[in-house]
Amino acid sequence: MLAENLGNVFELALELAYDCEQHLIDHLPKMIDAACSEPLHESLEQYVDHTKEHRARLEKIFAELDRAAGAEHNPVIRGITGEGEKLIKHIDRSSLLDAVLIMHANQIAHYEIALYESLVSFARTLSLQDAAELLEQTWSEEKTTAEALTRIAEQSVNREAARFQNTPHIFPLV
């Protein structure tokens, strides 16, 4: 679709978001299977549940716009998840892998945060208040997911993963 106005850009971004959520419903379970830490496992399971809710919200917005859910292919999320899958395959199940999974999940979440932040702004500008409210819920949940993942990393996973260091430390590990 050629974007000729903000409405076109909004619809294109909705399609990218929809493809993102569809793709993550398949990708996140791979991360769950790879996770060792129970808090990380639970957080990723919640991420999948939220992702399904996000997809349903987008479907509702598409219905309100009287159009089918988007078919635009999202190369950004596929690039991020492709890199994550490479890392998952090359690191043994361990706290080191959990640290990588958190980094990877945060890359995904922060991409989604940026996408949904723009969608909320576009919807408000276009006076699509119902869509803006639904998108704002998703944006908020993505930020909460990123914060929860960072908490898990900082409370335990990163310290456990630091034990995998085979080189002298420049800074003392506390």
Image (cartoon, rainbow, N blue to C red):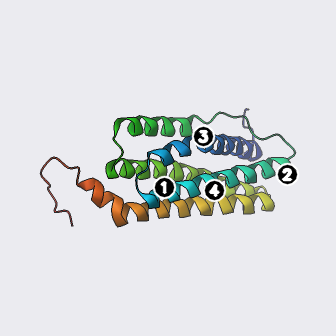
Between disc 3 and disc 1, the foreground one is 1
Residue 67 in percent (x, y) is at: 84, 41
| Towards the viewer: 148 or 131 | 148
Q: Mark 3 to mark 2: distance in Å?
A: 26 Å
Residue 89 in percent (x, y) is at: 40, 35
Whether residue 6 is situated above or below residue 158 in the rendered picture = above
| Towards the viewer: 161 or 41 | 41
Q: Are marks 1 and 2 in contact (CB under 8 Å)?
A: no
The structure residue drawn at horizontal position 53% and vertical position 52%, both measured from the top left corner, is 109
Residue that mark 3 sits on? 26
Dot 4 amino acid type: His
Q: Which mark is residue 71?
A: none
Dot 3 amino acid type: Asp
Count of numbered tags: 4
Few, some or many residues within 10 Å of mark 3 (<14, 14–19, 20+): few
For this orientation, the residue located farthest to the right is 66
Q: Mark 3 to mark 4: distance in Å?
A: 13 Å
Between disc 3 and disc 2, the foreground one is 3
* First in residue order: circle 3 vs circle 2: 3
Q: Mark 4 to mark 2: distance in Å?
A: 21 Å
Between disc 4 and disc 2, the foreground one is 4
Residue that mark 4 sits on? 50
The structure residue drawn at horizontal position 45% and vertical position 61%, both measured from the top left corner, is 39
* First in residue order: circle 4 vs circle 2: 4
Residue that mark 2 sits on? 64
Residue 169, by quadrant, is: bottom left
Dot 1 amino acid type: His
